[in-house]
Image: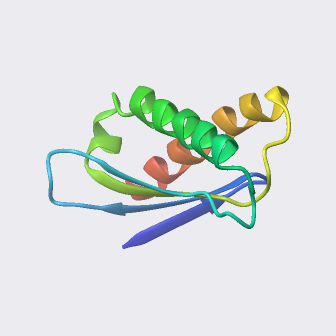
Amino acid sequence: MKHEASSNLIQVYAKSNALAYARLGLIVSKRIERHAVKRNRIKRILRETFRVSRQDEKIKTMDWVIRLRRPVIKHENELQLITETRLLMLKLVQCHD
């Protein structure tokens, strides 16, 4: 069963898997963020947020897809991106139970 949660900046999808590890997919569209340098920075931020959150046992048994919905403009928005990602992942883990 697939679960979905979204916020102002991102949309997160989660699905259970039968593996002993979690997988992550990132979607940062060229239409949303034109410059490759900015797209890559956003992907690095999302990967690091996922890596830190992966310590939770429930997160380890799920597949995740994170899609950027709006451009990340300044450093304040990067902090908002990290916070929203963590909150949505925790929300989806609770829904999964």
24 to 1, vertically: above or below: above
User: How far across and down, in percent of the image, does residue 49 sit?
Assistant: 51, 32
In the picture provided, is 57 more to the left or to the right than 50? left
User: How far across and down, in percent of the image, does residue 39 sit?
Assistant: 64, 47
Residue drawn at x 75%, y 51% is 9
Residue drawn at x 25%, y 49% is 61
Foreground residue, 70 or 96? 70
Foreground residue, 36 or 80? 36
89 to 30, vertically: above or below: above
Residue drawn at x 28%, y 47% is 22
Quadrant occupied by the N terminus: bottom left
The quadrant in which residue 10 appears is bottom right
The quadrant in which residue 84 appears is top right
User: How far across and down, in percent of the image, does residue 87 sit?
Assistant: 61, 40
User: How far across and down, in percent of the image, does residue 42 sit?
Assistant: 63, 41
In the picture provided, is 18 more to the left or to the right than 39? left
